[in-house]
């Protein structure tokens, strides 16, 4: 009995040590101030585009109005992972048989040449991250690149991407929640080469804030772990000059010139000196831009979308209790902006039974009043 008692004490000590380690590395956090304003648009402006029985990941809308979307990998999808909504119906893209190409595909973007780019983080880097591009007309693979471990190591989460207007440069965000080493990846399509930049720079790192979503505060395991992601949303200005980005739990939106990102001869310190703070932002997920230089940011605490003007003024555009977690943004034809509602609080570390009870899941759209470019 004494032996069992000693073993029990050792196990308790180990559990306490593990809990302490988790809390120090991932726990804690302060509430974030509410930066939202009275919405400029009525809630009635928000339209349902489609519903799906599994949580949505990201969305990209083609010039012909087809809506491409992923099922969020954190929901442990049971069916197709990349789909297209056309002619009122949803089907796997490019086909049901091609779904074996994907492990945990999440980010999607369409370039002006009509290529659908996807990024698969490989289950938080446990498998190799993979960048695939498809011809949206034929479904054929037109580009395939596996990121090396030096670029997407174990513990990485390369989950969002943007493509420039020439389809020559792809920019990817590595949230790196578990590894705690977020950064931006620059991919040269022509030369098939990738580089990590701004690795653990202050602009890509999370700050100590707790996300208070209307569904639940984003803390887990009795408060030992809080969702405090690094750089998540990224967006390119419509003239290709700037890459805008922000860590989800950070108070500032940043930008850096794409010319500097693309210049491999620049040292890290030189590149870091080019980073500019744009303005204070909400705790956000996805980003988008329009033709007038505005930046759109989802607001994951207040169920809506905010807009930051070129002068740095922040204003809430639309807000609705129907939106559980405004994730990715994509412009479509006729000036609509599409919102992928990934409902993160109802899927992250939740049972499949819980997810089924909270179904369906939605993609919404609304008109912000300023056009963008379809697909981004």
Image: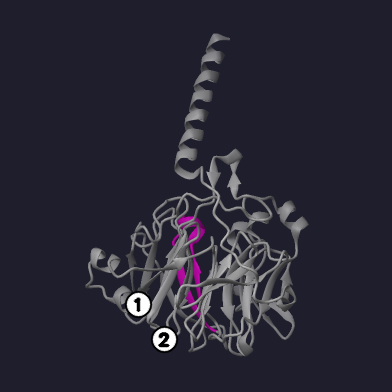
Q: Which residue is mark 1?
A: 258
In this rendering, position of residue 276 left or right of residue 72:
left
- Counting labels gives 2
Residue 333 visible, this angle: yes
- When the figure is inspected, residue 151 is found, relative to residue 85, above or below; the finding is above
Q: Quadrant of residue 213?
A: bottom right
Q: Residues within 10 Å of mark 1 (few under 14, many from 20)?
A: some
* Residue span colored magenta: 117-135
Front one among 325 and 311: 311
Residue 270 is situated, as x and y percent measured from the top left of the image, at: 24, 67
Q: Which mark is residue 239?
A: 2
Residue 57 visible, this angle: no
Residue 219 is situated, as x and y percent measured from the top left of the image, at: 59, 46
Q: Are marks 1 and 2 in contact (CB under 8 Å)?
A: no
Front one among 252 and 205: 252
Residue 237 is situated, as x and y percent measured from the top left of the image, at: 44, 80
- When the figure is inspected, residue 296 is found, relative to residue 12, above or below; the finding is below
**Residue positioned 65% across, 71% down in the render:** 39
Residue 224 is situated, as x and y percent measured from the top left of the image, at: 54, 40
Q: Is residue 126 magenta?
A: yes
Give the SS element for disc 1.
helix
Q: CA distance from mark 1 to mark 2?
A: 10 Å
């Amino acid at each position: 009995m004494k032996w069992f008692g000693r073993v029990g004490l050792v196990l308790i000590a180990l559990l306490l040590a593990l809990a302490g380690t988790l809390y120090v590395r991932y726990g804690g956090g302060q509430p974030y101030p509410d930066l939202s304003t009275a919405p400029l648009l009525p809630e009635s402006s928000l339209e349902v585009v489609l519903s799906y029985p599994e949580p949505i990941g990201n969305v990209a809308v083609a010039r012909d109005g087809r809506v491409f979307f992923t099922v969020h990998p954190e929901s442990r999808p049971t069916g197709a992972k990349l789909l297209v909504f056309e002619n009122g119906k949803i089907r796997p893209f490019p086909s049901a048989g091609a779904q074996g190409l994907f492990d945990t595909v999440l980010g999607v973007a369409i370039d002006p040449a009509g290529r659908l780019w996807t990024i698969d983080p490989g289950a938080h880097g446990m498998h190799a991250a993979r960048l695939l591009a498809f011809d949206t007309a034929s479904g054929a693979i037109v580009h395939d690149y596996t990121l090396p471990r030096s670029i997407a190591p174990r513990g990485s989460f390369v989950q969002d991407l943007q493509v420039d207007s020439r389809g020559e440069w792809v920019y990817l965000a590595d949230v790196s929640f578990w590894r705690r080493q977020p950064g931006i990846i620059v991919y040269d399509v022509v030369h098939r080469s990738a580089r990590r930049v701004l690795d653990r720079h202050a602009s890509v790192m999370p700050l100590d804030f707790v996300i208070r979503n209307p569904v639940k505060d984003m803390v887990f395991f009795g408060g030992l772990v809080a969702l405090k992601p690094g750089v998540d949303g990224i967006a390119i200005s419509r003239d290709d000059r700037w890459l805008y980005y922000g860590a989800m739990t950070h108070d500032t939106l940043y930008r850096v010139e794409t010319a500097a990102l693309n210049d491999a001869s620049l040292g890290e310190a030189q590149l870091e000196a080019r980073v500019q703070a744009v303005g204070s932002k909400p705790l956000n997920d996805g980003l988008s831009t329009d033709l007038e230089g505005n930046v759109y940011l989802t607001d994951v605490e207040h169920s809506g979308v905010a807009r930051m003007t070129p002068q740095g003024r922040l204003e809430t555009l639309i807000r609705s209790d129907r939106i559980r977690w405004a994730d990715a943004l994509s412009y479509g034809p006729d000036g609509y902006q599409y919102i992928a509602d990934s409902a993160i609080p109802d899927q992250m570390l939740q049972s499949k039974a819980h997810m089924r009870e909270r179904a369906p899941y939605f993609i919404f759209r609304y008109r912000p009043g300023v056009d963008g470019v379809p697909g981004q």
